[in-house]
Image (cartoon, helix red, strand yellow):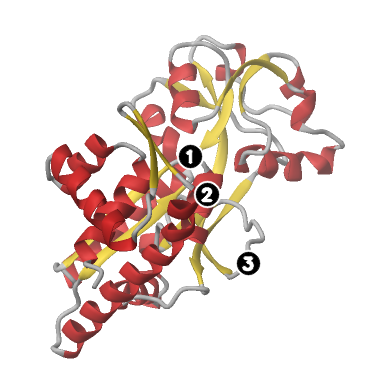
Amino acid sequence: MLELHELQVFLTAAETENFSEAGRILQISQPAVSAQIQTLENRLHTQLFDRAGRNIHLNEVGEALVPMVRNLLREAQRLEESITAYQGQLVGHLTIGCSTAAGKYVLPKIMARFRNHYPSVNMTCYVGAREHALERLCAGQVDLAVSSLRVPRSGVEYQHFSDDLLVLIAPLDHPWAKAASLCPEDLLAHPMVLRESGSGTCITLNRELAAFDMSIEMFQPCLTLWNTEAIVQAVVEGVAPGFVSYTAAEWALHAGLVAEVPVTGLRPVQRLYMARNTSFRTTEAQEAFWDFTFASENELLRQHIL
């Protein structure tokens, strides 16, 4: 008979491909992880990892086992949570993937309020690239995801979550810092710090610039960064102006470290979406958080500067 604890150890080891890291996450020793994996392999009469010294890699059998184990553990978690819910208490562990700067500022407010209502639900938020957040969602590694784009994925349902205004900020000693306003064409006159091509920021800006027969590809890039907060810091350090999420730049604006530069006719608003994978049955905690997030009485929690 398979043991759920063994399967959890296997899944953690499979996701990290490192027995020591798996032990750190599970708070057990590396030898204990090795022993649990060895017991599971003996029980299944097959190896699940290829070993070369201290390096381990999932083999073909192990890779095939991962989605089945993940589903089995989700069902076990859902069973436990459902029984507890029938007893009048919501418990569980909710995981969320977040790929937007604004989401990182909005989500904590909602999570904190949710925890006030359901203190027995533990929550983890993974922050990273949009592709990683959606890949985790499709693989069942997170329960929900927040994204600035609705990327078509099988079984993934998106719901409008919030809106985020993109603003142009400039170093205090930059010529634009004292301008009452710029025309869109003025944006071509000076180098700028830009996000990477394909980011939600670039897509939103290009949508707005199209009305002026312009695109972000016409800008002069002096630095490209894959992180909104890094752009804010670069502007603070005087590198060049850049378009960023208002929520990410708010601290620097209030501290007087950068200047907000209005651009006539340009008000790029980035829509944010919360996503769930309908291919998996929802847990009690996931369903409660989704309903809580989109409840009318919590609308103000999702709003910030619009």
**Amino acid type shown at disc 1:** Tyr
Q: Is residue 99 above or below residue 215?
A: below
Using a 10 Å C-alpha cutoff, classify the residue at mark 2 as few (fewer than 14 neighbours), some (14 to 19) or many (20 or more).
many
Marks 1 & 2, CB-CB < 8 Å contact: yes
Q: Is residue 188 left or right of residue 7?
A: right
Q: Please tell me the numbered disc located at residue 164.
A: 2
Q: Tell me the CA gap for discs 1 and 3.
A: 32 Å
Disc 1 designates what residue? 246
**Amino acid type shown at disc 2:** Asp
Residue appearing at x 19%, y 90% in the figure: 86
Q: Which comes sooner in the sequence, label 3 or label 2?
A: 3
Q: Is residue 54 left or right of residue 149?
A: left
Using a 10 Å C-alpha cutoff, classify the residue at mark 3 as few (fewer than 14 neighbours), some (14 to 19) or many (20 or more).
few
Give percent across and percent down for residue 80.
21, 78
Determine the secondary structure under disc 2: strand
Q: Please tell me the numbered disc located at residue 154.
A: 3
Q: Tell me the CA gap for discs 1 and 2.
A: 7 Å
Q: Is residue 92 above or below residue 222?
A: below
Determine the secondary structure under disc 3: loop
Residue 8 in which image quadrant: bottom left
**Amino acid type shown at disc 3:** Ser
Give percent across and percent down for residue 13.
31, 46
